Amino acid sequence: MGKLLLSYYGDDFTGSTDVMEALASNGVKTALFLGIPSDETLAKFDDCRAIGIAGTSRSQTPAWMAEHLSPAFAWLKSRDAAICHYKVCSTFDSSPDIGNIGKAIEIGRDIFAQDCVPVVVGAPELKRYTAFGHLFAAYQGKVYRIDRHPVMNRHPVTPMAEADLTVHLAAQTELRIALADLTMTVGDAAQRIDALLTEHPGILLIDVDGSCSQVIAGEQVWRLRSGRNLFVAGSSGVEYALLHAWNREGLTAGKGDFPLPGAVERLAVVSGSVSPTTERQIRHATENGFDGVPLDPLALVGDDAESAIDTAVASGIAVLRSGRSVILHTALGPSADRGIEIDRIPEARNRVGTGLGIILRRLVEAEALKRAVIAGGDTSSHALSELRVEVLTTLLPLQQTPGSPLCTAHGNYAATDGLQIALKGGQVGADGYFAQIRDGQRS
């Protein structure tokens, strides 16, 4: 494998494909591994300029991170990429106990023997913006401060009650946090950022509220390498910012070419999302060639979980054999959220995702399906592992609603090798997303 521009660890699977889409659609060929790959598997993708590992740290504890992120980061460091990125959700939802971003930064900072870790969260392409340290995100055509966002301020696991990311992050780490705000990213940005670094912060948050500040953020992150490999953290805003610097230096191949894959007659979807965005998408789909099959998430983790999975598979096969596509879902919007009951059972959320993955794999096997979708960020991280997939590559970027591309799965398991699959975050996609994936269209 030649010199890598970038390596990364995604804190969930949907976010990992988000990074892959941003890179691949802009001419940086990328492979996403579902764990540290063997040398043999890695060699199959030696023409890639970027590689990633899809992880589950967004739904894990700091103790889990200490055990699992350390070897992952060490392996990524050994790949000698110019930039190594710890990728987090663009809504930055996290807490001291679950998905602790500060802890992950501390681990990466130690492994890379680095004084300060740059952090970029704003990603205008995803309608995410940071201004004077505060995070804003769009929903239904309006932009909200993240603590007033109709979805993220009531996230079932990590609700966002604080918009100032320096305050939010300070609850997760003792590292000193410096802010390169919008006044710092105009004029002589390098001089101003260097002045901040003389104060020896452990974290440097760089504002991005639009194209101008994004260009400057990318230039400054690329400059801060100073001839060594640099560990950074943030959303896919890191990649979108760096692409400007890479394009200027001729390091990218221009826009990627992705022919439309065409439609499939039948599509299977499993969803563990409680997002109102996913609710609208499910309702739209059931009016456009899909049948919905509601599932009881508690049954999937109960004493008779195997029977519940068998029943779900039988229902899904019946729909598919009628010639229609199927969506098997554990909730239809926030009003159907069973989160309080689920959280009374140890590891239940992860087990729901695993159960959905088993259901989807069995549907793919039984009906030789060529295309599928998993909806829900945490769901995707646990469900995809059950499909016995080893690597993902980008098949079709969705330029109008970036963040959940259609991918090609690779692995040694015949039923899912070559499967076309999309991993959709709860907040991502237009109302017609599932039909769009079925039809193989960009919009």
Image (spheres, helix red, strand yellow):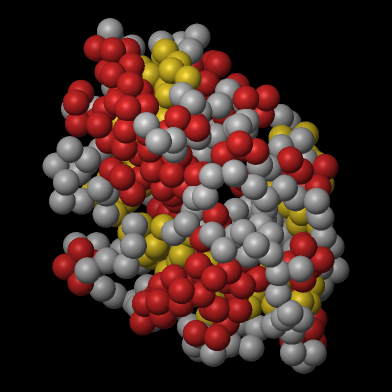
144 left or right of 24?
right
65 left or right of 406?
right
Residue under the image location 58 percent in, 23 percent down: 332
Residue under the image location 77 percent in, 71 percent down: 170
Residue 400 x, y percent position in the rendering = 55, 35
Q: Is residue 214 above or below residue 331?
A: below
Q: Is residue 122 above or below residue 257?
A: below
Front-most of residues 225 and 302? 302
Residue 419 x, y percent position in the rendering = 25, 38
127 left or right of 423?
right
Residue 183 x, y percent position in the rendering = 85, 68
Residue 339: in sight, yes or no?
yes
Front-most of residues 97 and 192? 97
Front-most of residues 173 and 14? 173
Q: Give the total of numbered labels.
A: 0
Residue under the image location 73 percent in, 40 percent down: 154
Residue under the image location 52 percent in, 21 percent down: 282
Residue 124 x, y percent position in the rendering = 67, 49
Q: Quadrant of the N terminus?
A: bottom left
Q: Residue furthest front?
A: 303
Q: Is residue 383 above or below residue 290?
A: below
Residue 242: in sight, yes or no?
no
